[in-house]
Amino acid sequence: MANEYAVSASIAAPAQRVWELLVDAPGYKRWNPSVVSIDGPIELGKTIKLVSAVNPSRTFALKVSAMDPPHRLVWAGGMPLGLFMGTRTFLIEPAGGGCSFSMSEIYTGLMSGLIFRSIPDLNASFKSFAESLKTAAERA
């Protein structure tokens, strides 16, 4: 079993519009019920503090490690010495008159198997994220 979660959606909106929603940290509260808050700018090399609805008592410090506007965004966080790392990748590709969106989170490191078993099931949260992003992008 892979230590990963993933979701995808077809969105009837331009890739740029989807990108703008993904990199607007203060705007997440308007469209994304799976995220309680994001503090800090979603910019390459910056660290954001994310609180998810799945675990609202914990704040995750995540470094934005890759940005290729409007196609790819990656943020990651974890434990020192590579013991555990969670890496979330967002991909947006033009498709027809809109775009395809995918989001995956892969867990790696020596402790990833053990820690992955303790992570709540994120399938519903991932689905909510993608559906909310689709609704917000198509409504804009």
Image (tube, grey):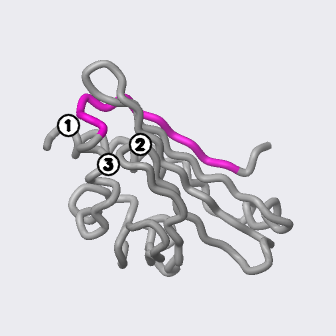
**SS of the residue at dot 1?**
helix
For disc 3, the marked residue is 19
Marker disc for residue 36: none
Disc 2 and disc 1: Cα gap in Å? 17 Å
Position of residue 109 relative to residue 67, above or below, is: below
For disc 2, the marked residue is 71
Q: Quadrant of the C terminus?
A: top left
Frontmost of labels 3 and 1 is 3
Q: Nearer the viewer, residue 108 or 32?
A: 108
The answer to whether the residues at label 3 and label 2 have Cβ atoms under 8 Å apart is yes
- What's the residue type where badge 3 is placed? Trp
Task: Determine the residue positioned at 67% across, 49% down.
Answer: 4
Badge 3 or badge 1: first in the primary sequence = 3
Magenta segment: does it hold 108? no
Marker disc for residue 138: 1
Badge 2 or badge 1: first in the primary sequence = 2
Task: Determine the residue positioned at 82% across, 68% down.
Answer: 111
The reply to whether residue 98 is in sight is yes
Magenta segment: does it hold 10? yes
Q: Position of residue 7 (x, y in %)?
A: 51, 40
Left of 84 or right of it: where is 86?
Answer: left
Residue extent of the magenta highlight: 4-15
Disc 3 and disc 1: Cα gap in Å? 13 Å
**SS of the residue at dot 3?**
helix
Q: Position of residue 26 (x, y in %)?
A: 25, 70
